[in-house]
Amino acid sequence: MKKQKSVKASFTTMTELVLPNDTNTLNNLMGGRMMHWLDIVSAISAQKHSNRMVVTASVDNVSFKNSIKLGSVVTLEAQVTRAFNSSIEVHVNVYAEDIPSGTKVKSNEAFLTFVAVDQSGNPIDVPDAIPETEEDMRLYEGALRRRQLRLVLAGRMKPEEAVELKSIFNLQQG
Ligand SMILES: CC(C)(COP(=O)(O)OP(=O)(O)OC[C@H]1O[C@@H](n2cnc3c(N)ncnc32)[C@H](O)[C@@H]1OP(=O)(O)O)[C@@H](O)C(=O)NCCC(=O)NCCS
């Protein structure tokens, strides 16, 4: 039987101060810098879950709802939602805080997928991820649909094999 680990064990937080070198000419955080931080915090989370080296397999679409200003404090909170064979989905919440004005807003949310690999770079099985809270459970259940969608988009799964996705569309039509 596969080893099991609570998703909580993978919780990882990272705090960054937006400095001039992180910003565009409008003095707002550059999207690419945010992507870099997302990749790091979620890779650490996936490593905690697997106790292995991991590689980024995919990043789901990330949208930038509001700009984050120079001098803001950015907090990223990552946690594994579900593990499959060698792949691990990580969910990240991003908060932007302006300390002088006392405002803190959720600015982004993202899902990234990592694959645990051995010393030769070959995929290796990871423990199952066990959800605890209702929110963990919601993310765990959605992970199968998101996995199928990204594998179809990557050309790694035939649309007709994406049973979970099909079931959503059938429900919506019915
Ligand atoms: C990710 C990688 C290890 C997959 O290797 P592979 O030989 O194609 O392995 P497999 O086909 O056996 O797939 C292994 C796992 O990767 C997952 N996977 C592969 N491509 C994926 C993608 N685009 N999105 C999500 N998951 C993906 C598969 O679903 C599978 O998951 P599972 O074991 O949980 O079922 C390989 O493509 C790789 O090393 N890519 C480069 C990673 C990297 O360098 N990232 C940084 C980019 S700068």
Image: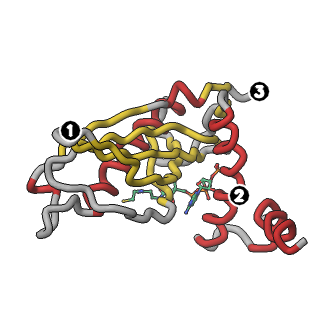
Measured as percent of width and height from the top left, residue 17 is found at 18, 43
Sequence-first disc among 2 and 3: 3
Q: Amino acid at mark 1?
A: Ile
Q: Amino acid at mark 2?
A: Arg
- Depth-wise, is mark 2 or mark 1 nearer the camera? 1
- The residue that appears at 50% across and 30% down in the rendered structure is 10
- Depth-wise, is mark 2 or mark 3 nearer the camera? 2
Screen quadrant of the N terminus = top right
Seen in the picture, residue 27 relative to 116 is either above or below; the reply is below
Q: Which residue is mark 2?
A: 145
- The residue that appears at 67% across and 25% down in the rendered structure is 3
Q: Rounded to the nearest whole Å, what is the CA distance between mark 1 and mark 3?
A: 48 Å
- Residue at mark 1: C-beta within 8 A of ligand 1: no
Of the pair 13 and 70, the residue shown nearer to us: 70
- Furthest residue in direction front, as rendered: 101
Sequence-first disc among 1 and 3: 3
- Furthest residue in direction left, as rendered: 20
